[in-house]
Amino acid sequence: MDKTINLTLKVWRQNGPREKGHFETYQVKNISVDSSFLEMLDILNEQLISENKEPVAFDHDCREGICGMCSLYINGRPHGPDDDVTTCQLHMRRFKDGDTVTIEPWRAKAFPVIKDLMVNRSAFDEIIAAGGYVSVSTGGVPDGNAIPIPKPDADEAMDAAACIGCGACVAACKNASAMLFLSAKVSQLALLPQGRVEAKRRAIAMVNKMNELGFGACTNTRACEAECPKSVSISHIARLNREFLKASFAS
């Protein structure tokens, strides 16, 4: 028989970005330790609906740690107490019977609350749209070996591309900086020859857009790296700074 636990949940409720939010306390019982955190929230919402109360709004999609939608601040940590996982991969075995669990949305000016635990992360989309792509015409699909790329560069580019844009780095940073996200998106292109053509324009455009959207400055506390569910390294921030300085001197 599956082990179950009872929990007290302190959940942030807020009707919209211009409304004042507050915590509400709920009790959930007989939660299987093998269930995921989002499944526990599903059970809470079923309970609220049965009591003719409004369910808690939270974001989710793939529930496989790929899409980055499950952006929750749990007991003072983005994505909760486990390391290198998203909220949807967090299992209730990480909690003890009788625990009080505090659940909040991301807290950042650039991520306004939509409702309850959902935030608007379209600022990341705007940063990508400012230059996080390759637009040069490459003709047909080239042979995989036509452009030799050193394996260390390819591996590092793939590590940067592992970023899922969940926003945990912003939520963890005391300044709500988006530098880890932005640097990962710059690195995945800057390390490859296909991305070098637009490197100067990309670095300046994406950094300017980030600043325009109200993200804070990076002070290298490494909280972003510690809480990133995909273990993206802050070494990419150093590369972004080099790319930005080179582009600034060249312009």
Image (cartoon, rainbow, N blue to C red):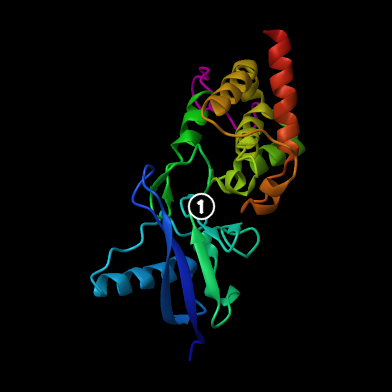
Query: In the image, what residue occupies the spot 53% across and 63% down?
Result: 89
Whether residue 60 appears in this view of the structure is no
Q: Main secondary structure of the magenta part?
A: loop
Residue 85 lies in what quarter of the image?
Answer: bottom right
Total marks placed: 1
The correct choice, above or below, for 10 with respect to 145 in the image is below
Q: Residue furthest bottom?
A: 1
Tell which of 237 and 64 is nearer to you.
Answer: 237
Percent of width and height locating residue 150 = 75, 33
Tell which of 59 and 142 is nearer to you.
Answer: 59
Percent of width and height locating residue 48 = 30, 71
Residues rendered magenta in the picture: 132-147
Query: In the image, what residue occupies the spot 63% across and 22% down?
Result: 203
Q: Which residue is mark 1?
A: 66
Query: In the image, what residue occupies the spot 49% across and 53% down?
Result: 71
Magenta-colored stretch includes residue 133:
yes
Q: Give the amino acid at mark 1.
A: Ile
